[in-house]
Image (cartoon, rainbow, N blue to C red):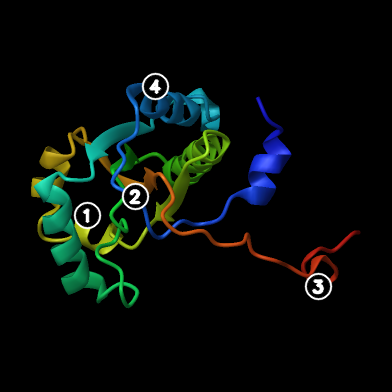
Amino acid sequence: MGSVFEAIKSRSSTRGYTDEKLTDDEIKSIVLAGLHAPTATNRQEIRISVVDGSNPVLAELDEEKNKAFGKGRPGAANFYYGAPTVFILSAEESFKWSRLDAGIAVQNMALEAEELGLGSVIIGCIEGAMWGEKREYFDKAFKIPEGYRFEIALAVGHKAVTKEPHTFNESEMVYYI
């Protein structure tokens, strides 16, 4: 097992994947990383839908996203960049802290993917489509429970492209008081 800080430092968004599928063990490990995330008041309201990248509903979602949000990055095949697995996180719509809890869970999952030597990209751009006029259809397709809503997604796969982690200027971004 590697250092958590090493995974944090080395992780960057992956926007290109090979066709190699994730193993059941890799999927399970990433899901468990999300489920181990803390939630406000220990609500444990996060639900995770594991979607095969070849599922035709993802293409429908991409088309709807393009209507609601506009086209993605030039050259991108779709919003999940052809990843073989997409994790859709949903949470209780009425719970004040669901968005924050989903963000914590997806970060755990992205770091676990990095630890496993996989690439990932955190996805929010489908929100307009997931909450739009086809919401009921997508909720059913992704098994989002009643009273829950999409919060965030994560695409994961074997890297076909690499990117250096971002740099930053600590002296401009951190205030010690």
160 with respect to 137 (left or right): right
Judged by depth in the image, the label closer to the viewer, 2 or 3, is 2
Residue bearing mark 2: 18
Amino acid type, mark 4: Asp
Inspect this view and state whether residue 93 appears.
Answer: no
Q: The N terminus lies in which quarter of the figure?
A: top right
Q: Are marks 2 and 1 in contact (CB under 8 Å)?
A: no
Q: Earlier in the sequence, mark 2 or mark 3?
A: 2
- Among the two numbered marks 2 and 1 on one chain, the one whose residue lies closer to the N terminus: 2
Cα gap from disc 2 to disc 1, whole angstroms: 26 Å
Q: Earlier in the sequence, mark 4 or mark 3?
A: 4
Q: Which of the two marks, 4 or 1, is nearer to us in this view?
A: 4
At label 2, the amino acid type is Thr
Q: How far across and how far down the image is residue 31, in percent?
A: 40, 28
* The one of 159 and 103 positioned closer to us in this rendering: 159
Q: Which amino acid type is shown beneath numbered disc 3?
A: Glu
> Compared to 171, does 145 lie above or below?
above
SS category of the residue bearing label 4: helix
Residue type at the position of mark 1: Met
Look at 64% across and 41% down and name the residue there.
Answer: 7
Rendered view: 46 above or below 102: above
